[in-house]
Image (tube, grey):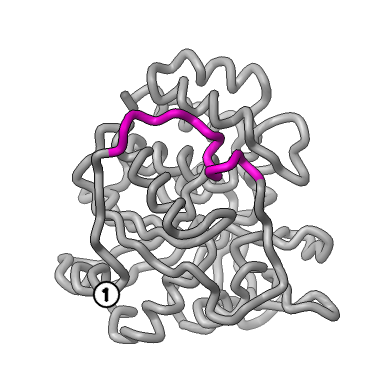
Amino acid sequence: MSKPQIFINADTGIDDATAIVVGLFGNELKVEGILTTRGNMSVKQTTRNTLCVLQLLGEKEIPVYVGADAPLEKTNFSVTGVHGTDGIGDFTFPKLTLKTDKNLDDFYKELSLIEGKVSIICIAPLTNIALLLSTYPQCKDKIDRIIIEGGLLENDTTSPSFNVASDPKSAEIIFNSGLDITICPSDMGHTAYLNKEDVLKIQKMGKTGEMLEFIYRSYKDRVVQKGIATHDGCTVACLAKPELFKYKKAEISVRYITGSQVGMIYFDFESKKPNANVCVSVDIKGFKEYLFDCIKKAP
């Protein structure tokens, strides 16, 4: 059976680097390309980070498409100055020789030529995908499903997830698109976090493990104070190893925190009009074993 073809929408930093390793070395997925967008850093920096990670992994043929550097509509939500000065732990990568001159228009052109359908894994603000659906609505026929990291199952308004809070308008467009959507809430990454012993194991897993251990030193999470949350890695695993998760149908929508432009995913598990599959639990042991196996297979 052929592997699912995927594109990863990323704002490459520490968590994204882990997810890219999972996507490339889990052997269940075929990564066709990576779209970059601004996150904690500008799209110029996240693109550079993406190219650095791919080069270190020896994946020099994966196309990288430079996407949006601003949300569809300006919000008053911002997170800066975390995960090191470059957003990826200030790791000293080898001199960068990879380059890209591709953009979202190039992405659509190449998407239209791919045989069959693709899945898009979103571990970053959703601007690129909203722009794609708005500019090229015919592309919906090429998308099998969209897997999105974000939200909290208890609908906690005190800790809105970055990927939606930074561009709620784009989230609304995608949630109302009629496409097959899977949500991997931040609860999964909080539950399946890496403890100190896990990180020490990873450090011994070759060049990639050494890189990950170093960048983890700069990782910060509001919930996981002593460990490394695995939000983005879990989101890739949702497609690669769905048996590691349990799901429930829900209606998802964007709701705004009172008195602000900050949006959050609202989960309604009682709705009679569900529009998404939502991960509600993760096999922690199974996920960690899968993650370790992916890292071991990397250079």
Left or right: where does residue 13 sit relative to residue 156?
Answer: left
Q: Position of residue 49 (x, y in %)?
A: 42, 45
Asked whether residue 267 appears in the rendered view, the answer is no
Dot 1 falls on a residue whose secondary structure is helix
Q: Position of residue 147 (x, y in %)?
A: 47, 61
Relative vertical location of residue 139 with respect to residue 236 in this rendering, above or below: below
Q: Position of residue 174 (x, y in %)?
A: 50, 77
| Image-quadrant location for residue 282 | top right
Would you say the magenta stretch is mainly helix, strand or loop?
loop
Task: Give the residues drawn in magenta, as a range.
Answer: 82-96
Dot 1 corresponds to which residue? Answer: 105
Q: Say which residue appears at 66% left-offset and 82% top-offset.
A: 272
| Image-quadrant location for residue 4 | bottom left
Query: Is residue 132 or residue 46 the one in the foreground?
Result: 46
Q: Say which residue appears at 44% left-offset and 28% top-offset.
A: 92
Question: Identity of the amino acid at label 1?
Answer: Asp
Q: Say which residue appears at 67% left-offset and 68% top-offset.
A: 165
